[in-house]
Amino acid sequence: MDLLLKELNRYKWDLVGLSETHLPRTGEETISGTSLLLSGRTDGTHRQGVGFILSPTTKKALISFTPVSERIATIRLKGSVSNLTIIQVYAPDSARSDEECEQFYFQLQSVTDQTPKKDMLIVMGDFNAITGNDQVDRRDVMGPHGHGRLNGRGERLVSFCRENDLYITNTAFKHRHRRNVTWRSPDGVTENMIDYVLISKRWKSSIMDTLGTSLVVQEEEVRSHPSLAIKKTTVLEDENVLEKQCGFCNEKGVR
């Protein structure tokens, strides 16, 4: 985690969402003035885990933090037009059973149902799903700039979006290929888009751009910081390259 915080010094950021932290603890911590909100396993196993990192500025806008499980956590932030509810997730990968995947979506649906109706809802993180680039029958939930071929977990994600009137912002904007993929195999041969940022359709017009897992929100929607964006970062931790970090950053990105 110290390496992650050091890496973030390269960016102008306000909030970072974490997937697959491998930290077996839950609660709020403060590291060098930075707030760390964790939701991890309780059996001591260093697997799964989600959370958020908040800058001092964003901490002032924090209304609540709810650790749900080692795969789901939520925060609520004070906004000017509307408050924001952000759900951070780490979905079961393809090696996990369909039953475990359904359990995850059942819990995610329960959390989504508890979101205040007037809030801007953002669901983001590692869904371990491929929604594909042929969106002819999925135009209601995604744009034309997906990646790969739709798989079973992608179908489940699309279904979740339809049930909750959510839109997959990653697929709405055209960017260079390397900017859209969010996962690469260790040998660099296989690339996919498996991390997503979803937003309520009623707030879709607030989205200025999405780059990879970077979401630029119109500044009047958020009080905690002008021109917030969700920015993907790549960091080194324990000699492993993690490419599953999302966070609120200034629109200008890297300093």
Image (spheres, grey):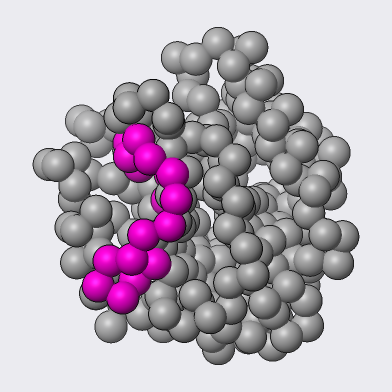
Count of numbered tags: 0
In the shown orientation, is residue 109 left or right of residue 40?
Answer: right
Check the picture and name the quadrant holding the C terminus. Answer: bottom left
Q: Is 107 placed above or below 37 here?
A: above
Image coordinates of residue 43 in percent, x first then y, are 39, 24
Residue 26 within the segment the image draws in magenta: yes
Q: Depth check: give the residue in front, 183 or 199.
A: 199
In the shown orientation, is residue 190 left or right of residue 71?
Answer: left
Name the residue located 46 percent from the left edge and 83 percent from the top edge.
Answer: 57
Q: Is 188 placed above or below 252 here?
A: above
Res 23 seen here: yes
Picture quarter containing residue 102? top right
Name the residue located 76 percent from the left edge and 45 percent from the top edge.
Answer: 112
Name the residue located 41 percent from the left edge and 75 percent from the top edge.
Answer: 55
Image coordinates of residue 254 in percent, x first then y, are 31, 77
Residue furthest to the left: 239
Name the residue located 63 percent from the left edge and 27 percent from the top edge.
Answer: 104
Q: Depth check: give the residue in front, 46 or 183.
A: 46
Q: Is 86 placed above or below 8 here?
A: above
Please report the bounds of the magenta region as a residue range.
18-35
Q: Is 177 placed above or below 156 here?
A: below
In the shown orientation, is residue 79 left or right of residue 55?
Answer: right
Picture quarter containing residue 37? bottom left
Image coordinates of residue 80 in percent, x first then y, are 73, 85
Residue 163 within the segment the image draws in magenta: no
Res 218 seen here: no
